[in-house]
Amino acid sequence: MFIFDISNPLTLILMLAATILVIFLAQEIKKSYIAAIGLFVYLIVLIMHVAQIATLPEEYRYLLTTLSRCIVIDFIFVLITFFSYLWVDDIEAKIENKKSIDNSLDWFWKKI
């Protein structure tokens, strides 16, 4: 059974580096859809890991702890990319003088 094990330290470091680069690219270009692509990818990976746990055969029950760690890491990456999407969307909205999708975090952005 193939498992995309993101709890492996090397894979985790590479994914974190790729996420930081995508967030930096979105911030430099000032386009929020780039950060949304990262969010969409991590949501797909999360759905894939949940589906693997739901359909895990009895002979692969030893992979349950690995998949559980992967799901926790997926949630962390979804949280990071969601906040980065909101941040870049706020930057894009200020530049183009349009309303942001969500202004409830204005107090947070002012402190950064």
Image (spheres, grey):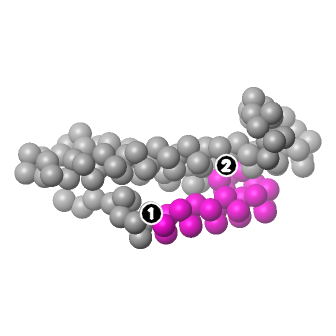
Residue drawn at point x = 72 percent, y = 59 percent: 26
The residue identified by callout 1 is: 12
Which residue is at the far left?
Answer: 59
In the image, the segment drawn in magenta is 13-35
Q: Main secondary structure of the magenta part?
A: helix
| Residue 93 colored in magenta in the image | no
Q: Quadrant of residue 94?
A: top right
Image: 26 above or below 86: below
Q: Which amino acid type corresponds to the residue marked 2 in the rendered image?
A: Ser
* Image side of residue 37 versus residue 57, left or right: right
Q: Quadrant of residue 4?
A: bottom left
Image: 12 above or below 100: below
Q: Where does the image place residue 15, in percent across and percent down from the top left? A: 49, 64
* Image side of residue 100 versus residue 41, left or right: right
Q: Is the Cβ of the residue at disc 2 closer than 8 Å to that at disc 1?
A: no
Specify few, some or many for label 2: CA neighbours under 10 Å numbering under 14, 14-19, or 20 or more. many
The residue identified by callout 2 is: 84
